[in-house]
Amino acid sequence: MAELGSHGVGNTAPATVSRLRDVRTRMARSAAGAGRSSHAVTLVCVTKGQDLEAIRPVLTAGERVFGENRVQEAQRKWPTLRTEFEGIELHLIGPLQTNKVREAVSLFNVIETLDRPKLAEALASEFQSGRPKPELYVQVNTGREPQKAGVAPEEVDGFLTFCRTICNLEISGLMCIPPMGQQVSPHFALLSLLAARNDITRLSMGMSADYELGIQLGATHVRVGSAIFGERPAP
């Protein structure tokens, strides 16, 4: 887990850095309450809709793991930031179209939204090019919401078998976004169960409103945006 520093950020974005420190404090408290090490949980700072000037103070404060929802937006921002800061790990946490697979593979270290056979096949094909392979998480639609991406819970075992045996993909984790307005605990518990029975150890679950509960229920990665950056700017 990145250490928080203050060099270069005192006059640029004090509110952002203060919120970041608060998130880190809450993460550590939640981990300790669950008998876990704070180092067992990775903070993914979600920068969807944030410009370079909003992101730089968080990088200067020591954070190196970030999440973006769209390939094209990430392409506009992160090549520049990677020339300024070393060791950045970038997660794709939004839907991936098959025609964007090549760009995604070249830009992201982790793709958290593998959710259908066609995408698995496209990733497998791209991996044959010999390029570095990002880690892959399967997105699970724990609420079975028809408008939301993700594999239905009852189809996860079969989909993982398809990815592993037919496409020869290594699956590192599972990710979920519980339905709005519902208790998140059953969804996090379900994701943990699916992961355990499929020998998967990484769980991306918990966002700004519920990352503490995610940590208590076994999350290894939490995706936090507005709790750090404030409300997202209008497009």
Image: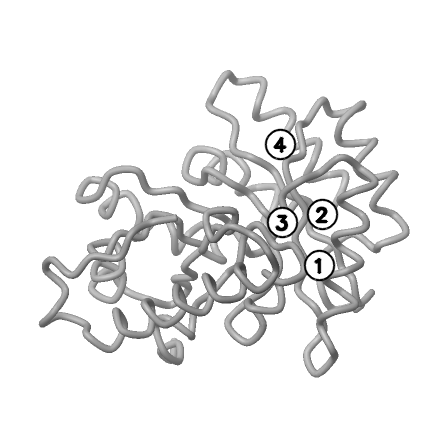
* Nearer to me, 63 or 102: 63
Circle 4: residue type: Leu
Relative to 21, is 131 on the left or the right?
A: right
Q: Are marks 2 and 3 in contact (CB under 8 Å)?
A: yes
Q: Nearer the viewer, residue 168 or 60?
A: 60
Residue position marked by numbered label 4 in the rendering: 123
According to the image, label 1 marks what residue? Answer: 149
Q: Is residue 71 left or right of residue 160?
A: left
Secondary structure at numbered mark 3: strand
Residue at the extreme right: 154
Q: Secondary structure at mark 1?
A: loop
Q: Earlier in the sequence, mark 1 or mark 4?
A: 4
- Tell which circle, 2 or 1, labels the residue nearer the N-terminal end: 2
Classify residue 127 as left or right of residue 83.
Answer: right
Q: Are circles 3 and 1 on residues that touch, CB within 8 Å? A: yes
The residue pinned by badge 3 equals 113
Which residue position is annotated with label 2?
115
SS assignment at label 4: helix
